Amino acid sequence: QVRLVESGGGLVQAGGSLRLACAFSGRTLGTYAMGWFRQGPGKEREFVAGISWSGGSTRYADSAKGRVTISRDNAKNTVYLHMNSLKPEDTAVYYCAAHFGRDGSSGFSWDEADYWGQGTQVTVST
């Protein structure tokens, strides 16, 4: 059974940084593209960043470019989301998701994902 567990969320001041982690278990992480999504209060869920199965390709939402880096360590079955220069509008529940495939793709939608985590809350204060 595949399980994704996010961690690293919390309360941070604007301008601060956080590193989220997504622990993947139950399958071989190296056969999945991974992504991070978020849903802020009163907002639609949105794509933040994605990474191909090998880590060779990444994709970012416009709102994340320059401030966010997605990475993965297949040996540790973990995917990371490094976030810098956080803004209050980054406040959201952050979810990781897995999409089966080794075609090199780094982007997929929430509905295209095969597995999802439960989410971790990130709150950015002014």
Image (cartoon, grey):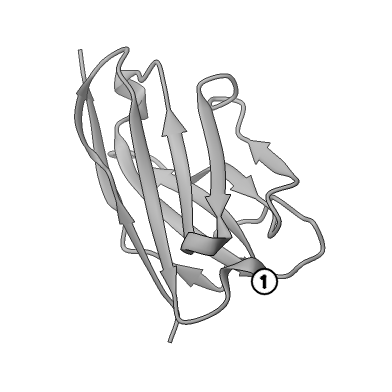
Residue 85, quarter of the rendered image: top left
Q: Residue furthest right?
A: 103
Residue shown at 53% from the left, 80% from the top: 27
Numbered marks: total: 1
Determine which residue is flagged by label 1. Answer: 31
Whether residue 65 is visible, yes or no, is yes
Where in the figure is residue 120, as x and y percent of width and height?
28, 50
**Image quarter hosting the N terminus:** bottom left
Q: Is residue 124 above or below residue 79?
A: above
Where in the figure is residue 105, as x and y percent of width and height?
76, 55
The amino acid beneath tag 1 is Thr
- Camera-nearest residue between 42 and 36: 36
Whether residue 45 is visible, yes or no, is no
- Circle 1 crowding by C-alpha within 10 Å: few under 14, some 14–19, many from 20: some
Residue 113, quarter of the rendered image: bottom right
- Camera-nearest residue between 56 and 107: 56
Residue shown at 36% from the left, 20% from the top: 86
Where in the figure is residue 94, as x and y percent of width and height?
36, 46
Q: Is residue 37 above or below residue 85?
A: below
Q: Residue furthest bottom?
A: 1
Residue 57, quarter of the rendered image: top right
Residue shown at 54% from the left, 25% from the top: 63
Q: Secondary structure at mark 1?
A: helix
Q: Is residue 19 above or below residue 98?
A: above
Where in the figure is residue 73, as x and y percent of width and height?
54, 54
Q: Is residue 12 above or below residue 79?
A: above
- Camera-nearest residue between 55 and 93: 55
